[in-house]
Amino acid sequence: MENNLTLTGSDGRGELLWLSENAYVRQASSDYVLNGLAQCLALVVPVGMSEEDREQWLAAATVQLYDKHLSPEELDYALKKARDECDHPAKIVPAVIRALGDNWKANCVLLQSDSNVSSIADRFETIMENLRLGEYSQEQIDELPERAKRYAIERGFLRMVGGKFVWRAPASHRLEADA
């Protein structure tokens, strides 16, 4: 059975290129996705699955996951979960999507809701500024995309407490509270 799928590296679209250069979103390349899926498949491949069938499965699964715009970290996490629980190739992609939960959907919405890169950058900077100033409630922080929260930790606006992202008061606020 032949297919016409060709696996290529990152397609370099403007939005993803800009976002990756600014350390906000790094999408896992198709090669990265393919290698991760191959590791999963090696653990559960049925005896009767031919090499050609494996290649077709890998091509289809790679396209399916690459289109989700996952970061390497998200993909690694989800593939580890899939390796732990799957016993058949047909269960791998659904297990990856299940492992990601609702978080990846929020990240995709953030990427796809604006086709204009400058509006994405503006929205991102607005989120960072609001976090810096402490203008978000804990509920609003919880609803932010995972990538934005992780980036806010790097900038020093959030911290992890008990597995939860919380606002990190600037040093000036902490000094006033201690006085």
Image (tube, grey):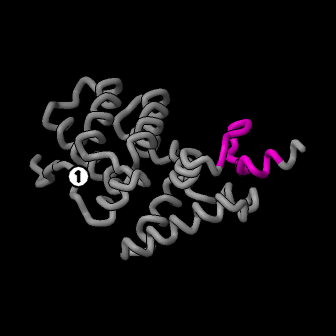
Residue 68 appears in the picture as rendered: no
Left or right for 102, reference 4: right
Label 1: state its secondary structure: loop
Task: Report the span colored magenta.
Answer: 158-175
Residue 37 appears in the picture as rendered: yes
x and y percent of residue 151 in the render? 52, 50
Q: On the image, which quarter does residue 45 sit in?
A: top left
Crowding around mark 1 (Cα neighbors within 10 Å: few <14, some 14 to 19, many 20+) is: some
Left or right for 41, reference 59: right
Q: Residue placed at 35% from the left, 50% from the top? A: 27
Q: Residue furthest right?
A: 179
Q: Nearer the viewer, residue 124 or 114?
A: 124
x and y percent of residue 17 in the render? 29, 59
Count of marks, rendered view? 1
x and y percent of residue 94 in the render? 44, 45
Left or right for 22, reference 153: left
**Residue 71 covered by magenta stretch:** no
Q: Residue placed at 67% from the left, 46% from the top? A: 165
The disc labelled 1 sits on which kind of residue?
Ser
Q: Which residue is mark 1?
A: 10
Q: Residue placed at 33% from the left, 56% from the top? A: 67
- Indicate the quadrant containing the C terminus: top left, top right, bottom left or bottom right: top right
Q: Nearer the viewer, residue 77 or 157?
A: 157
Q: Nearer the viewer, residue 48 or 162?
A: 162
x and y percent of residue 176 in the render? 84, 49
Q: Residue placed at 31% from the left, 51% from the top? A: 66
Q: Is residue 170 above or below residue 39?
A: below
